[in-house]
Image: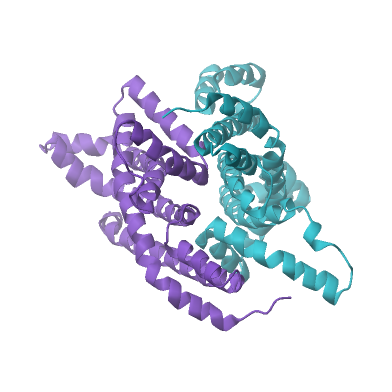
Amino acid sequence: MRPFHPLYIIEAFTKIVPFIPVTLATMAGTVLIGGVLGLLLAVGKLSGKKGLSAAVDSYIYIVRCIPPIVLLFIVYYGLPELLKASGININDSGKWFFVITTFSVLFSATMAEVFRTSYEAVDKGQREAALASGLTEFQAFRRIVAPQALIVAIPNFTNALVKLMKEGSLSYTIGMIDVMGKGQLLIGMNQGSYGLETYIALALIYWTLTVVLEKILGTAELNLSRGKKNLAFGR
Amino acid sequence: MELNTKFMKETFFIVMKAIPVTLEITIFTMIISMVLGFALSLKKIGRKKNHLVNFYVSFVRGTPIVLQILFFYSLLPTLLNYILNIVLKLNIKIFDINPIFYALAVFVMNTTAVLSEVFRASLLSIGQGQMEAALAVGLTPWQAMRRIIIPQSLTSALPNICNTTVNVLKSTSLAYMMTVQDIMAVAKKQAAFGYNYIEAYLVVLVWYIILCTVIQLIFRVTEIKVAQYKQGKRVKVLKIQGLRRFSYAGIKERAQVVWR
């Protein structure tokens, strides 16, 4: 049995922690782009036009079947070639570009479903009542439908976000230096030794990040659904 | 950009030969985890809070599967070698073990946690009265479980089991890190000869979509079969309609119309 050095876990931990912002930044970029894409997809699906919603459905279906690592490799090897044909050179752009592109595609499919289900979870009567009492369509959405849909969306969004973070660790395979990438780099610099200790440190970091994310969003959900609870008690 | 279509055609069939490996991992993982996950879910339903189970589920949920794969692949072989050969002196050639078993170990560990949650939710969706009534009629607890509770909870669990299976299938694409020769590994090897990476991965993509579709179709059919008990006697006609349209909700609607 090769020697195990518990102290190295701490050393690896302190070396990896500075790279948490990189992971979080790529996540934020993905959430932004993937979220907007997902919103557009959800709007397309809810539009009621048959062709459009069928197209959105097949997009979601196909994306759900793709293993993240396969898509990551396809984007990493394929996108520069594809864009070179149209005269754009992205070979020099950072790895984050490919990572965000890949995971935005994956995230948008999940988010489309999150948006759609949460919109549909709000009773139609809510919007109708709002319109009947004189609000405009936009006001009804902003003041009545959206706040209620948001509460329904948060648990699913949390799951999607945690999944995104965990899948995002794959970006080390194309050489991105985020939390996982730095861990791999450390193992490389130690000529492959201390592997176990580094992985434990990585596991601790990801685990903590997951728990913190879930806590934050859980609190947000509680805060947002406060209005709902008061109503229930008031009855 | 020009794709090497000749290479893609060849690779498509070469990759096809590796499909049994991918399916083997998926199917065995699902079978083993279903048994373990069910046992674990029964434990979770019990009144007492089990910190070890919570810890385990939280660990699996909180860490990426790549990390679990790398961690256990660097830990398990040396640990097994130490325990079996140095402590117990069994002289087994640990390093000749097919890496599929390590892959199975990691995926089972991961999937058991997910399935235990799925089963717990589906078991809780069955009213307490069902069990009590079954016991009152004179069934043993095991009979009540097998004949009354499980068939009912299966209807609500199946969509989630289908999702889990698809997720396991997708994560098998990471097994190449443990030198398992699945479709991903084979395609990678083919690509390396002539640097045809895009083509090879597109082939893999197509294969995953095909496999994924097949799995989902199988589950659709099973769902319809399992839900038959809800529909009384007219099951036969409905089953044929259902197969034609592959939509459970649609059948349910029609079933109600026919029933009235």
Q: Quadrant of residue B45?
A: bottom right
* The N terminus of chain A: image quadrant: bottom right
Q: Position of residue B30 (x, y in %)?
A: 67, 46
Picture layout, residue A230 above or below residue A63: below
Image point (54%, 27%), residue name: B248
Image point (40%, 36%), residue name: A81
Image point (54%, 67%), residue name: A188
Among the chains pictured, the one given purple colouring is A
Furthest residue toward right: B90
**B185 lies left or right of A142:** right
Tell me the shade of chain B.
cyan
Q: Position of residue A221 (x, y in %)?
A: 33, 58
Q: Position of residue A79 (x, y in %)?
A: 39, 38
Q: Quadrant of residue A58?
A: top left
User: Front-most of B178 and A51?
Assistant: B178
Picture layout, residue A103 above or below residue B221: below
**A80 lies left or right of B201:** left
User: Front-most of A41 and B147?
Assistant: A41
Q: Position of residue B153 (x, y in %)?
A: 62, 43
Image point (33%, 61%), residue name: A222
Furthest residue toward front: B194
* Residue A218 appears in the figure: no
